[in-house]
Image: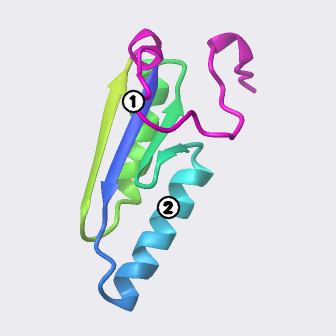
Amino acid sequence: MRLVLFFDLPVGTAKQRKDYRLFRKFIVKEGFLPLQESVYAKLVVTDAAASSALAHVRKHRPPAGLVQILKVTESQFATMEYITGKRPDFEEVDTMEELLVL
């Protein structure tokens, strides 16, 4: 399944910009890959892994702004249609067969 993370954070002050940068660095370090500017997705193997990732994001949430996570199955994620634009150029794990869990 995938966790799709959406965020909209304020960047009006220097502190808010720092909080934005720290949160973005955190989610990338946690394995979220960008789909759009403020939309990231992470592949998780089990509900327990999803719960753990959700708990980590809650623990490191920024003090202001909006952060949302949507859990979708692989089949739901695969039906995403690109109306304009194209798929991102980065290497993305598309199937569970390509995922190596250590």
Quadrant hosting residue 72: top left
Q: Residue furthest bottom?
A: 14
- The residue lying at 46 percent from left, 64 percent from top is 23
Q: Which secondary structure dominates the residues rendered in magenta?
A: loop
What secondary structure is marked by label 2? helix
Q: Per the image, is 69 magenta? A: no
- Looking at the image, which is closer to me, 98 or 57? 98
Instruction: Name the image quarter holding the C terminus.
Output: top right
- The residue lying at 56 percent from left, 62 percent from top is 25
Residue 63 vs 51, above or below: the answer is below
In the picture, measured across the screen, residue 1 lies left or right of residue 9, that is right
Query: For the residue carrying disc 1, how many other residues have a C-alpha within 10 Å: few (<14), some (14-19), or many (20+)?
Result: few
Determine which of the numbered discs, if any, sits on residue 83 in the image: 1
- Looking at the image, which is closer to me, 81 or 48? 81
Q: What residue is pinned by disc 2?
A: 24
Spatial separation of the CA atoms under disc 2 and disc 1:
26 Å
Query: For the residue carrying disc 2, how many other residues have a C-alpha within 10 Å: few (<14), some (14-19), or many (20+)?
Result: some
- The residue lying at 71 percent from left, 23 percent from top is 101
| Segment tinted magenta in the rendering | 73-102
